[in-house]
Image: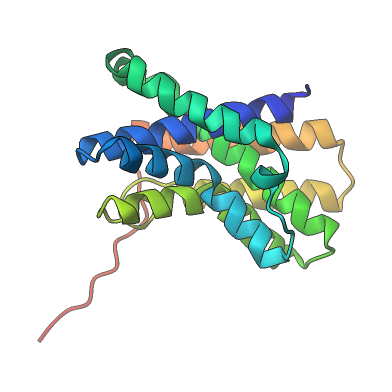
Amino acid sequence: MNLLDFADYAGTFAFAVSGTLSASEKKLDLFGASFIGFITAVGGGTMRDLLMGNTPVTWVKNVDYFLLIFSAIIFTFIFFKRVIKLKHTLFLFDTIGIGVFTIIGIDKALIYDLSAPICMVMGLSSAVVGGVIRDTLCNDVPLIFHKEIYATACIVGGTIYLLLDFFNVNLYFSQIATITSIIIIRLLAVKYNLSLPKVTFAQK
């Protein structure tokens, strides 16, 4: 297993845990929490694959994802109190996850010979759509629309990845540079409470 595969699994696990935790805060039942955890983990990749006509979607073709996600859900239920204490660790895995998913989305779009802007959209979809679905189903305003610099970090990282690919830079270096840039941007945004300007319209 290479570094990207390991990070992919770690990010998928973290996304499933974050979805399950969000559902528990809304006091959903066992099925509801499991569904939210599952859709958080696979939502982005599913949307990406459907948009590109890559069917069956990735998690349907690879049972490892299915087993990993439900292991994460069961783990969260059993060790709930300990998981809550590991929020900082889960935040790091989540951040690594969006970096990896951004790369995976872009790579799959490049295989289809799509243009750079569309590749970026596919990378962004892989990274954030699962979280958008999670927040929407939990009746919250999606995180990327109102709080942290989240999608912006993916866009910056994705741009770096596309530029390095254009100049045929070593793939391993490109992956590390992309993931590192996304991690740094998110950590700085959270530490210094950075966010994009809010859109407000003056009313008469």
Residue at the left extreme of this rendering: 204
Location of residue 168 in the rendering, given as x and y in whole percent from the top left corner: 90, 46
Image: 32 above or below 201: above
Q: Is residue 150 left or right of residue 136?
A: right
Q: Quadrant of residue 137?
A: bottom left
At x 73% / y 58%, what residue is drawn?
55
The correct choice, above or below, for 141 with respect to 77 in the image is below
Q: Quadrant of the C terminus?
A: bottom left
At 43% from the left and 48% from the top, the residue drawn is 131
Q: In the image, is 104 to the left or to the right of 165?
A: left
Displayed quadrant of residue 100: top right
Q: Is residue 100 left or right of residue 129?
A: right
58, 143: nearer the viewer: 58
Name the spot of residue 41 as percent of width and height, x first.
51, 41
Q: Is residue 181 above or below residue 83?
A: below
Residue 11 visible: no
Q: Position of residue 88 (x, y in %)?
A: 38, 21
**Image quadrant in which you'd find residue 51:** bottom right
Q: Nearer the viewer, residue 71 or 122?
A: 71
> Which residue is at the far front?
31
Vertical side of 194 occupied by 198: above or below? below
Q: How is the image coloured?
A: rainbow
Answer yes or no: is residue 201 visible. Answer: yes
State left or right for residue 88 relative to residue 151.
Answer: left
